[in-house]
Image: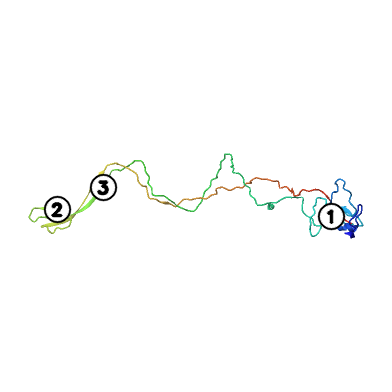
Amino acid sequence: MAEWGFPKGSGDALTADEVNVFMPIGSIIAWAKTYTNTPALPEGWVECDGSVLSDADSVYNGQTLLDLNGGEFLRGAATSGGTGGGASVTLTSTELPAHTHTGPNHTHTGPSHTHNLSSHTHTGPSHSHTVNSHTHSGPSHSHTVCYHSHSTSRVVNYATVTDGAGFGSYCLILDCGLCSTNTGSANPGTSSESGTTGSCAPGTNNGGTGATGAPSNNTSGSEGTGATGSGGTGASGSAGSGSAFSILPIYYNVVYIMRVK
């Protein structure tokens, strides 16, 4: 270190080359500008306040200085000059982690009310209804029968036979039509008979119970379809304001300064 004049004695000033060893031109450091008893900036240093430098001895003469004292942080990178970031942020739904909202068991109570339906029909495909065999029972009752008669008639085959002995003639009913064993002459013929077999008087017949008929199918009729109601949606409750919030870490303000010559 002797070539740089070290060690230095009390009151000895650093040469330009010696300063360049520690702080080359373009270096930026933090400076406690308003801290009590802080001295003024030494020669060759300026605040990074975004003003245009006017110093003929500086390599930055006429250039706009960096503006680093508006709340910016310094970040290391391969090149200098890039900017970005922000003091606050507003989250969007895509930036939120996947989550669910669960509410307690509850009920909804509404006032007494009615639902009115307009006249309408329900139409469905043709179908049948089958009725099982069954009976119908009723109270004791009677049936009245009017006066009436029954008539009948028949044809009788006969023959008049004359006895050869002189005893006279008699009528022979020929149910089978055989007369060959009789002696004498025969005069066959036919005769019709008719008559009423009788009549009956009015009367009553106490009825009972019984089946009224066999099961049958009813092919007419319709069945309908209809909506039972439409579903609804509702909000589970709102929370939050959607406002931007600060993302600044805990900080202490300093003033950035830059060596320009």
Q: What is the distance, in whole Å, between disc 3 and disc 1 at their CAs?
A: 144 Å
Residue type at tag 2: Cys
Single out the mark in the foreground, 3 or 1: 1
Residue found at the far top of this picture:
112
State left or right for residue 123 relative to residue 93.
left
Q: Position of residue 164 (x, y in %)?
A: 8, 56
Badge 3 vs badge 2, beta-carbon distance below 8 Å = no
**Residue that carries the numbered disc 1 in the rendered image:** 28
Helix, strand, or loop for circle 1? strand
Badge 1 vs badge 2, beta-carbon distance below 8 Å = no
Helix, strand, or loop for circle 3? strand
Residue nearest the observer in this picture, 63 or 242: 63
State left or right for residue 105 relative to residue 69.
left
Badge 3 vs badge 1, beta-carbon distance below 8 Å = no
Q: Which residue is found at the position 89% from the left and 59% from the top? A: 2
State left or right for residue 2 relative to residue 140.
right
Residue type at tag 3: His
Q: Which residue is found at the position 12% from the left and 55% from the top? A: 161
Above-or-below relation of 141 to 258: above
> Along the polypeptide, which appears first: circle 3 or circle 1?
1
Q: Is residue 170 visible?
A: yes
Residue type at tag 1: Ile
Q: Quadrant of the N terminus?
A: bottom right
Q: What is the distance, in whole Å, between disc 1 and disc 2 at their CAs?
A: 169 Å
Q: Residues within 10 Å of mark 1 (few under 14, many from 20)?
A: many
The label number, if any, that marks residue 150 in the structure image: 3
State left or right for residue 131 relative to residue 10.
left
**Residue that carries the numbered disc 2 in the rendered image:** 171
Q: Which residue is found at the position 84% from the left and 54% from the top? A: 28
